[in-house]
């Protein structure tokens, strides 16, 4: 909501037009000064608006001011930061904004306001780190997925800062805490994204994707490479919870971290994936183990795990396309070209572009053995190129490597064909166009 609109709320409320005004018993001077604050705020006359807020504060008494009043006061002083730019004045205005938060929190304490204040302190690089710790501790895990994007980002930024500032034995404590909070925040982001997706709100989904990107970026400061990350997480594996569900949740979180950092070929990743299967043999667990073997170029083993992941996920599973793409790519590596083609053809969603590349690869690999004549065999490259163009239309990079192997003008003329003719390729049960 724009500042003018926020201030307009005050103007309406002090005239008695809403229920909040009716619930409060305000003196005439209080109403007058709140109204004047709103009027001057609407006109972006910030210094005058601030002066009338001070008068309203005195006339009303701080306990009579509501969240709208305090919120607009903060908005006024925030706007003044843009016009009063001397260092001394900047400090004074920021302190006034903090005072507005703290005074409101004395009377109207909520987790939302507490988290907002903490994020504001981090953004302004406030020095009272203990206060910031306390404010976040009182709000983050009450709000969970209701945290704003900025609050999530500033909270994790603060935790990473704590790790970087800490010395000695406490440094490892700070790192471990930041890692655990990263996992929780990632869960909250996932829940928030799902809610937005259910409402077909792509802007909301994109916002939380952006938040996850920031978290992932800051996380690199906790462990700069796979070797360090494995060393850190290996210690945590030794202290996993005993309770089955809690243990599994931790393992899945660590697998996610390793995968995002490109460390899913490490032995620790394989061990965690195996543990996940033994605790709960889900599609996700089998996929993780398949991913481990795939990254280690053990494609035969990987294929077995991907096949199980696809089977367990079922036709309605939200990760089915992801699992089928991995299976198709592994079948291609294992030279099971027809199987790779058939699996990839079933892939939909955002993975479909990459699946089309797998189809092209399968067709190209069998080109020299599919067809009765040289023309027929080379015509397979047109079909492979068709799939590359489908992949390109879905956002993947186009390569002409298959088109370069297709028949030239002389070859298709000698075969009695002309540009635009249809050629049926029995190996794939599909047709392509001479060109």
Image: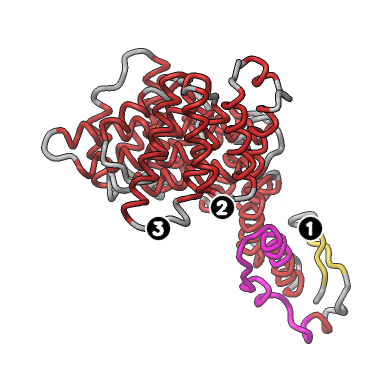
For disc 1, the marked residue is: 426
Q: Of the residues tagged 2 and 3, which is closer to the observer?
A: 3
Q: How far apart are marks 2 and 3 (CA)?
A: 63 Å
Q: Is mark 2 on a helix, strand or loop?
A: helix
Kindly identify the residue that appears in the image at 58 percent across and 50 percent down. Answer: 336
* Position of residue 43 in the picture relative to residue 282 (left or right): right
- Do residues under tags 2 and 1 come within 8 Å of each other at their CB atoms? no
Q: Does 269 appear above or below 108?
A: below
Q: Who is closer to the viewer here, 148 or 376?
A: 148
Corner quadrant of residue 9: top right
For disc 3, the marked residue is: 85
Q: Who is closer to the viewer here, 221 or 358?
A: 221
Q: Of the residues tagged 2 and 1, which is closer to the observer?
A: 2
Chain-order first, disc 2 or disc 3: 3
Chain-order first, disc 2 or disc 1: 2
Q: Where is residue 36 in the image (x, y as percent from the top left)?
A: 61, 38
Q: Which mark is residue 332?
A: 2
Kindly identify the residue that appears in the image at 42 percent across and 25 percent down. Answer: 139
Q: Who is closer to the viewer here, 123 or 272?
A: 123
Q: Which mark is residue 342?
A: none
Per the rendered image, the range of residues in magenta is 385-411
């Amino acid at each position: 909501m724009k500042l003018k609109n926020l201030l307009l709320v005050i103007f309406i409320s002090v005239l008695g037009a809403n229920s909040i005004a009716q619930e409060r018993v305000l003196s005439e001077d209080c109403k007058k000064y709140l109204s004047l604050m709103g009027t001057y705020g609407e006109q972006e006359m910030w210094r005058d608006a601030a002066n009338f807020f001070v008068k309203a504060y005195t006339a009303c008494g701080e306990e009579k001011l509501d969240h709208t009043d305090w919120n607009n006061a903060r908005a006024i002083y925030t706007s003044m930061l843009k016009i009063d730019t001397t260092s001394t004045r900047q400090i004074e205005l920021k302190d006034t904004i903090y005072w507005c938060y703290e005074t409101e929190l004395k009377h109207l304490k909520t987790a939302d306001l507490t988290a907002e204040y903490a994020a504001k302190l981090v953004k302004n690089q406030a020095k009272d780190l203990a206060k910031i710790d306390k404010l976040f501790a009182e709000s983050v895990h009450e709000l969970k997925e209701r945290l704003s994007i900025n609050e999530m980002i500033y909270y994790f930024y603060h935790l990473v800062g704590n790790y970087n500032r800490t010395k000695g034995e406490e440094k490892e404590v700070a790192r471990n805490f930041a890692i655990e909070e990263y996992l929780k925040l990632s869960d909250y982001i996932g829940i928030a994204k799902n809610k937005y997706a259910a409402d077909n709100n792509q802007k909301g989904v994109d916002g939380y994707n952006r938040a996850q990107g920031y978290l992932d970026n800051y996380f690199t400061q906790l462990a700069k490479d796979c070797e360090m990350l494995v060393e850190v997480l290996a210690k945590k594996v030794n202290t996993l919870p005993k309770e089955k569900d809690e243990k599994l949740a931790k393992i899945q979180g660590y697998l996610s971290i390793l995968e995002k950092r490109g460390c899913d070929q490490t032995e620790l990743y394989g061990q965690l994936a195996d543990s996940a299967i033994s605790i709960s043999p889900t599609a996700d667990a089998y996929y993780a183990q398949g991913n481990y073997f795939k990254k280690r170029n053990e494609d035969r083993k990987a294929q077995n795990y991907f096949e199980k992941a696809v089977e367990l996920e079922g036709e309605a599973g939200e990760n089915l396309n992801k699992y089928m793409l991995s299976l198709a790519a592994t079948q291609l590596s294992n030279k099971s070209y027809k199987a790779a083609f058939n699996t990839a053809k079933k892939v939909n969603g955002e993975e479909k572009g990459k699946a089309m590349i797998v189809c092209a690869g399968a067709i190209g690999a069998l080109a020299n053995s599919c067809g009765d004549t040289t023309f027929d065999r080379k015509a397979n490259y047109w079909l492979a190129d068709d799939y590359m163009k489908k992949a390109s239309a879905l956002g993947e990079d186009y390569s002409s490597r298959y088109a370069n192997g297709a028949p030239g003008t002389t070859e298709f003329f000698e075969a009695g064909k002309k540009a635009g003719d249809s050629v049926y390729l029995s190996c794939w049960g599909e047709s392509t166009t001479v060109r």
